[in-house]
Image (tube, rainbow, N blue to C red):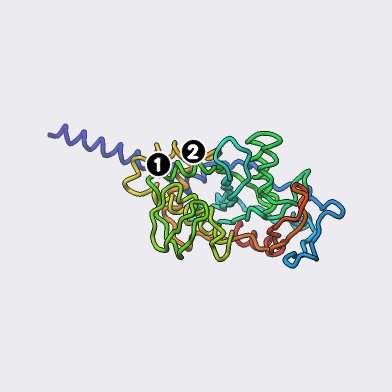
Amino acid sequence: MKRWKLCALTVVVFAGAGLGLLYRYLEPARHFEMKTHPVIAAPSASTSTDPPGYSQSLPNDPIAVEASTAPLALPADKPVQSANLNESTAFNALILGLDTTSGQTARTDVILLAHVVPAEKKVHLISVPRDTRVPLPGIGLTKINHAHFMAEMDGDKKSGTDAAIQAVSDLLQIPVHYYVKTNFSGFVTFIDTIGGIDVDIPKDMWLSMTRKPLEAGSRHLDGLTALAFVRERYSLEDGDFGRQTDHMKVMRAVVQKLLAPEKITELPGLLKLAKKELVDTNLTDSDLISLAWLFKGMNGQDIKYRQIPGKSVIAADPLVRSPLWYWEPDKERLKELIRENLH
């Protein structure tokens, strides 16, 4: 009997020590404090300017709005300082969703920058509309989602990823440390594999992609419906900006599902599947678990969600050589947003 008790005590001690080490390694503040964040993109030193006579409004068009001809990069004499990572272990992660299935040249349909502060258990999300007008090297002022498409078409998938990340870094004038890139098929497969997600729908809406209604209330979404939900903008009152809010709802729903008690034992396998279905990421398995842990313990006040301030404009585009609709960032309000939410 004594020998049995000794064995049991030994097992408990080792199990406790193992859990303690696991907690110390994966607890968000501790985990990211032990890491040196890679800088995969930093704001370019040079700023772009419009080619002579390039940027123009269309005064004869009743919906045309005059577009600013100034470059979108922040003034060189007043750069926005990056966060002090040594004090807060904060980092910036970029989420890119491609508007394709697989093997095709794609634009970035979803662009979401997450400023994560593990020590404070807070996340600041900045949504970048895909039609945001930015200067791209060798192209001029065009839509930010063209960065991935053009670079991938001229090079490869890595070139597309690098160009998209750099475009966001230049727009927000901040370094980017991590990224996650996925496409339609990967998203659908992953949502179906975890058994779908539960999302609160505030109002009845029409899903253009599936041509089906989605009624208000708590709804269980399979992969295809979840994709249609995050892509829908035409039936929303605030269009693309409403869609960006829905992106955050889905992110939280995925985290809640992954960390549900019945899924804990499956978590290692689900993370392997997630990385397989994701097109690309530089986050490790332990990073993903730690981030999921961080999101799990958050409430609504811990996650701040902001959208790029600006206005609608119609202006000539150097790629299609015709007028296009853009979202023109308000540079002064954007600088204020960055200072308040990314530092």
Query: What is the total number of numbered labels drawn onto the structure image?
Result: 2
Q: Position of residue 96 (x, y in %)?
A: 58, 46
Q: Position of residue 166 (x, y in %)?
A: 68, 45
Q: Position of residue 213 (x, y in %)?
A: 45, 58
Query: For the residues marked 1 and 2, what is the alpha-carbon distance in whole angstroms?
Result: 11 Å
User: In terms of secondary structure, where does tag 1 sit?
Assistant: helix
The residue closer to the viewer here, 119 or 200, is 200
User: Disc 2 marks which residue?
Assistant: 277
User: Disc 1 marks which residue?
Assistant: 193
Amino acid carrying label 2: it is Glu
Relative horizontal placement of residue 64, taking residue 281 as reference (left or right): right
User: In terms of secondary structure, where does tag 2 sit?
Assistant: helix
Q: Are marks 1 and 2 in contact (CB under 8 Å)?
A: yes
- The residue drawn where x is 56% and y is 58% is 233
Amino acid carrying label 1: it is Thr
Q: Position of residue 304 (x, y in %)?
A: 53, 61
